[in-house]
Image: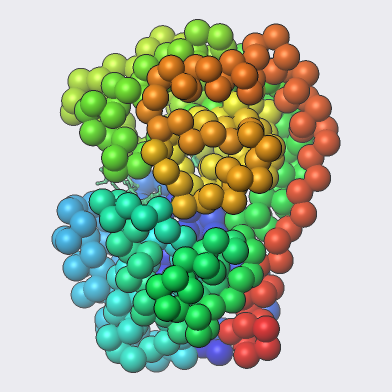
Amino acid sequence: MRIVSVVGTRPQLIKAAALVPALRARHEEVFVDTGQHYDEAMAGTFFAELGLPRPDHALGVGGGSHAEQTARMLLALEPVLVAERPDAVLVYGDTNSTLAGALTAAKLGIPVAHVEAGLRSFDRRMPEELNRVVADHLSRWLFAPTPAAVANLAAEGVTDGVLRVGDLMQDLAARIGREVSGPAALAAVAGALGLPLGPGGYAFATVHRAENRDPDAMRAWAAVLADAAADRPVVLALHPGTRAALDAAGVELPPGVHVVPPQGYRTTLTLQLHAAAVLTDSGGVQREAAWLRTPCLVLRDRTEWVEAVAESGGRMVVVGLDRRRAALELARLAPAADAPRLAAERAAGLDLAPAGAGVAIAAALAGNP
Ligand code: UD1
Ligand code: UDP
């Protein structure tokens, strides 16, 4: 099949890295980058690091309000799809690039394949929830990562074209996790960042959700990180949108929180694997922490990745921005005295299998699931 894949954001580049080899083994792919993420550290760097193909079409649409951004993507995508005449358009996840890719294709009568179909937070205030729901209801192939995602679709009356394929990001985490499981990998990252980070001797954090860029929310999660930093350094890999929101609201981060720019994929996986704990509102980081078995506090009120929490044996807790609860859970999951031993054991015992999602998606698109 001739497939146009639409990517645009950091997590989509990472997911594409897991799918592209399997997809190109069976199909012809045209790679379109909307440019939703455009900083070198948010986008460009992943092309080289993860061996992604150069985009056949780079649309250069980034920034602006949701309506403006999505509208510019629709305008830029339509002539590309008309000219490329694909058999299908493949979109990933729940960003504005997902919505634009799915909507443009559907309006042109081109079948849509949605990777990570069926996730629901049941919170329609989240831009991601709107994007997912629309993309799912426009899709012919709905590649669901989890049983809960399949059930969510069934509850909305969507069963045709739904296939549970596992989680594409697990395929990549399994491959790269093996490469970074030794203490030397952490030592190299610590050296590059200029921070004294030993196994289990620090916490790793990311924060970027729209709801966590509100001034009150930023003060609340800064307090959560301040408590975590009382026991050990916290490394916060900061999304540029969050950096801008902190600066605009004049919110300062506490001492002990080491803010670093967005990091590459290997560095991020290394920092998660060897950490005492991960604190995040990211969907991708949350799942990676689960696969790596690193204790994780989810800085959101709810998550669409319910299995990651349910199957964590209590290692993953959805704490929202509740400072007291976060401090208690961190003390329980990563007591300062034991964390280095626990982290070293965890990294040494890492045994993460690929999910096989890439191969399953490529086969299903070939009509041979
Ligand atoms: C987007 C997705 C979100 C996803 C996240 C992954 C939507 C609605 N949201 O959020 O689901 O979890 O990507 O990281 O699609 N910015 C830069 N440089 C960049 C990119 C963004 O400075 O390379 C800043 C700009 O100020 C921009 C802001 O971040 O306006 C928001 O960027 P945007 O792409 O609209 O949404 P994200 O917050 O990145
Ligand atoms: N990630 C990264 N560098 C960072 C922060 C995250 O490479 O500084 C990776 C992370 O390991 C995961 C993906 O980006 O694979 C998650 O993307 P993000 O948090 O931007 O979005 P979400 O998953 O919440 O949509």
Quarter holding the C terminus? Answer: bottom right
Question: Is residue 131 something one can see in this rendering?
Answer: yes
Toward the front, the furthest residue is: 155
Question: Is residue 17 something one can see in this rendering?
Answer: no
**Residue in the picture at 36% in, 79% down:** 138
Q: Position of residue 40 (x, y in %)?
A: 41, 46
Q: What's the coloring here?
A: rainbow
Q: Is 104 or 194 nearer to us in this picture?
A: 104
**Residue in the picture at 68% in, 37% down:** 313
113 up-or-down from 274: above or below: below
Residue 124 location, quadrant: bottom left
Quarter holding the N terminus? Answer: bottom right
Q: Where is residue 128 in the image (x, y as percent from the top left)?
A: 34, 56
**Residue in the picture at 32% in, 71% down:** 134
Residue 170 location, quadrant: bottom right
**Residue in the picture at 52% in, 67% down:** 151
Q: Is 162 or 369 nearer to us in this picture?
A: 162
Q: How many marks?
A: 0
Q: Position of residue 15 (x, y in %)?
A: 54, 60
Q: Where is residue 118 in the image (x, y as percent from the top left)?
A: 47, 66
270 displayed left or right of 102: right
369 displayed left or right of 210: right
274 up-or-down from 174: above or below: above
